[in-house]
Image (tube, rainbow, N blue to C red):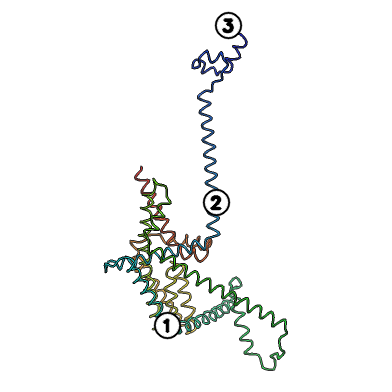
Amino acid sequence: MRGSSPRMTGCWLLIPVAFDERVSRKAVRRGIKVASSGNTGRIQARNDLAWAISVGGIGAMLFAALLVAVWYFASTLFLIFAGVLLGVALLAMSNLLGRVTELPHPLRLAAICLLLLALLSGAIFLGGATIAQQATALSGTIKSQVVNLKAFLEKYGVDTSYLDIGSLTAAAAPGAQGADAPASDKPHNLPSAGTIASSGGAILTQTWKIVLGTVGAVGNFFIVVFLGLCFAAQPGVYRRGLIALAPRKHRRNTAVVVDRIGDTLERWLMAQLTTMFAVFLVTWIGLMLLGIPSAFILGVQAGLLTFIPTVGALIGGLIVVLASLASGAFAALSAFVLFLGVHALESYILTPLLQRQALEIPPATLFAFQILLGVVFGVWGLALALPLVAIAKVVIEFVREDGEKDA
């Protein structure tokens, strides 16, 4: 610039040339540095990117922590979910009773609980001894038939080493060897003090394991019952509490999703209970007519395993066939035909008729989720895969409908 001093030239160099005209000459002469709008935009973009990275990192860490918590507390979460399902079932029965009578909800729920308690008590006191005897006989029959099946497969060159039935063979072998051994070959020496001590310690260890297992099973049962009664007694309180966890602007949508999930689970549970009772009744009567021992307990296990789709029916049919092998080949074949008939009744008549309005999940999708949850979470995941998939389906359908409305 002509006639400008070195100081003025240095001041002009501090200002970008593209924005000279926007800055007053007075500010330039004083040496004030002016940031351009382009620099401001870049700074804002960097700040936004840093904020997005921070939020994304925190979200990823929270999601990872949630997965770890679910992994470590899976049994407790499934136990709570089982209590929720029991509460939904009791609530569905109470609503069904409400169609007949105009009693308030607490009285209807109390009547349902008393009826279920009376049925359970009657089954225990009137047929408890018979059920225990049949369960013991069935356990022995299954063990012996598994050992016979292992011997049959090994006879024809089939490797059964991958099957975990060595304990059954070992348990059966000592008894047979002891019975066949002559009296002169049996040892008459008294066991040593160390043998007695080790045997006593093993007995105490096994007894302690049995006691802990029994206490744990009974405790889990009462936890599920308590949670179910609490959820069924005051469903509105827990519904409002669940909706309150969502942000205020999403509470209306959350209420719609919660209500849909509740209705879906109610319809599915009532249909499932009806199917379970029908399978139990048909299996019990059919096995009793065929003359299969332990027919009642076999019918009970078939009805209970119906709660687990696909896998439960296969396990129940396998147990029925193995238990029938003790009565001969014809009885086993008849039991297998009965199993096929019961499975056809459940799959092609009861399930489409009763659950047509409740759930429509493709069998391959359900089976895949069952295998996945069963491998990851064990028996709990296998048993509760269907209601979990039903909940996921309701949420996905609502999100899709909401997206179509916004579009």
The alpha-carbon separation of the residues under discs 3 and 1 comes to 115 Å
Tell me the number on the disc at residue 377.
none
The residue indicated by pointer 1 is 125
In the image, is residue 346 above or below residue 401? below
Residue denoted by label 3? 2
Is residue 16 visible in the rendered image? The answer is yes
Q: Position of residue 386 (x, y in %)?
A: 43, 62
In the rendered structure, which disc, 3 or 1, sits on the residue that comes first in sequence? 3
SS under mark 1:
helix
Compare residues 141 and 212 and report the one nearer the observer. Answer: 212
Which kind of residue does numbered mark 3 sit on? Answer: Arg
Q: Toward the viewer: 382 or 331?
A: 382
Give amino acid for label 1.
Phe
Q: Residue at x 42, y 66 (%)?
A: 228
Q: Are marks 1 and 2 in contact (CB under 8 Å)?
A: no
Please state, as top left, top right, bottom left or bottom right, where the C terminus lies in the image: top left
Give the mark nearer the N terminus: 1 vs 2.
2
Specify the label residue 64 is tagged with: 2
The Cα atoms of the two marked residues, 1 and 2, are separated by: 50 Å
Q: CA distance from mark 3 to mark 2?
A: 66 Å
> Which quarter of the picture shows residue 193?
bottom right
300 is higher (above) or lower (below) than 177:
above
In the image, is residue 312 above or below residue 248? below
Q: Quadrant of residue 260?
A: bottom left
